[in-house]
Image (tube, rainbow, N blue to C red):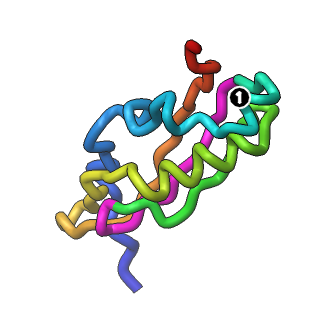
């Protein structure tokens, strides 16, 4: 069988991934417990540019913040799909980090 086409153009976020998260998204339980930190994640992006899977690669120390990160990335993040050497759209992975800081009162 011929070798698989080589990925030449990676998936590209349509906006800065951190811009998909606002203070309004901060989980109430994390605010009550004064939890903050940085969540690292890996997104599997399908050929349609949508997130198919989110994996936490570095925990913020708060499961609430980590779970919210993946929920928001799955529902809001959109990508220009990766393409292979033949120009066909293909799946890819993208990594990122969200820094959760308690909202100002």
Q: Secondary structure at mark 1?
A: helix
Vertical position of residue 43 compared to residue 69: above or below: below
47 vs 102, nearest the viewer: 102
Magenta-span inclusion, residue 13: no
Look at 26% across and 67% down and name the residue there.
89
Look at 32% across and 60% down and name the residue there.
49
Q: Residues within 10 Å of mark 1 (few under 14, many from 20)?
A: few
Give residue 91's quadrant in the image. Answer: bottom left
In percent of width and height, residue 12 lies at 30, 44
65 vs 91, nearest the viewer: 65
Q: Residue furthest bottom?
A: 1
Look at 58% across and 14% down and name the residue there.
105
Give residue 20's quadrant in the image. Answer: top left
In percent of width and height, residue 42 lies at 57, 47
Q: Main secondary structure of the magenta part?
A: strand
Vertical position of residue 72 compared to residue 37: above or below: below
| Quadrant in which the N terminus is drawn | bottom left
| Magenta highlight range | 37-49
Vertical position of residue 81 compared to residue 69: above or below: below
In percent of width and height, residue 19 lies at 38, 32
47 vs 76, nearest the viewer: 76
Q: Residue furthest top?
A: 104
Image mark count: 1
89 vs 86, nearest the viewer: 89
Magenta-span inclusion, residue 47: yes
Q: Residue furthest front?
A: 105
Give residue 41's quadrant in the image. Answer: top right
Look at 30% across and 68% down and name the residue there.
48
Q: Which residue is mark 1?
A: 31
In percent of width and height, residue 23 lies at 50, 28
């Amino acid at each position: 069988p011929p070798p698989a086409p080589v990925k030449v153009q990676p998936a590209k976020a349509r906006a800065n991934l951190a811009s998909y998260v606002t203070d309004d998204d901060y989980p109430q339980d994390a605010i009550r417990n004064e939890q903050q930190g940085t969540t690292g994640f890996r997104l599997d992006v399908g050929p349609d540019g949508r997130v198919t899977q989110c994996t936490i690669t570095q925990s913020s120390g708060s499961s609430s913040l980590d779970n919210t990160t993946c929920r928001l990335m799955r529902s809001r993040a959109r990508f220009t799909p990766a393409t292979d050497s033949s120009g066909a759209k293909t799946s890819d992975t993208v990594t990122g980090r969200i820094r959760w800081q308690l909202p100002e009162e």
